[in-house]
Image (cartoon, rainbow, N blue to C red):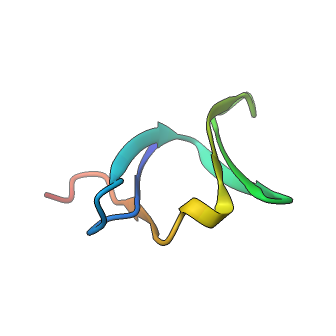
Amino acid sequence: MAKYSINSGYSDYRTIDAWTYRVEGDFIHFVDADNTPVLTVRAGQVYVIEREEPGAA
C-alpha cells in the first residue's frame, strides 16, 4: 500500500492509503491490492494527486 495525498495545499486536502488509483469516466477510484475501491472521488474535485514515498518525512 502507498499513501496518496489528494489536493495538497487546498482546503479539502486528505490522505489515503491505497495500492493504486484508476480513472473511470468522471471518477477517480483509489483501490487496494484486491482492486476493491477504498475511496472514490469525482475527478472535477481533484486538483493534485501525489504519491508519498515510503520513509519520506
How many circles with numbers are drawn on the protein? Answer: 0
Regarding residue 40, the answer to whether it shows in the image is yes
Tell me the quarter of the picture where residue 37 sits.
top right
Q: Position of residue 45 (x, y in %)?
A: 56, 61
Q: Residue at x 30, y 66 (%)?
A: 10
Q: Is residue 48 above or below residue 14?
A: below
**Quarter of the image containing the C terminus?**
bottom left
**Residue at the limit of the structure toward the left, as seen here:** 57
In this rendering, position of residue 57 left or right of residue 31: left
Q: Position of residue 49 (x, y in %)?
A: 48, 65
Q: Residue at x 86, y 59 (%)?
A: 25
Q: Is residue 37 above or below residue 46?
A: above
Q: Position of residue 41 (x, y in %)?
A: 62, 47
Q: Residue at x 79, y 59 (%)?
A: 26
Question: Along the line of sight, which residue is nearer the eye, 50 or 57?
Answer: 50
Q: Position of residue 39 (x, y in %)?
A: 59, 36
Regarding residue 1, the answer to whether it shows in the image is no
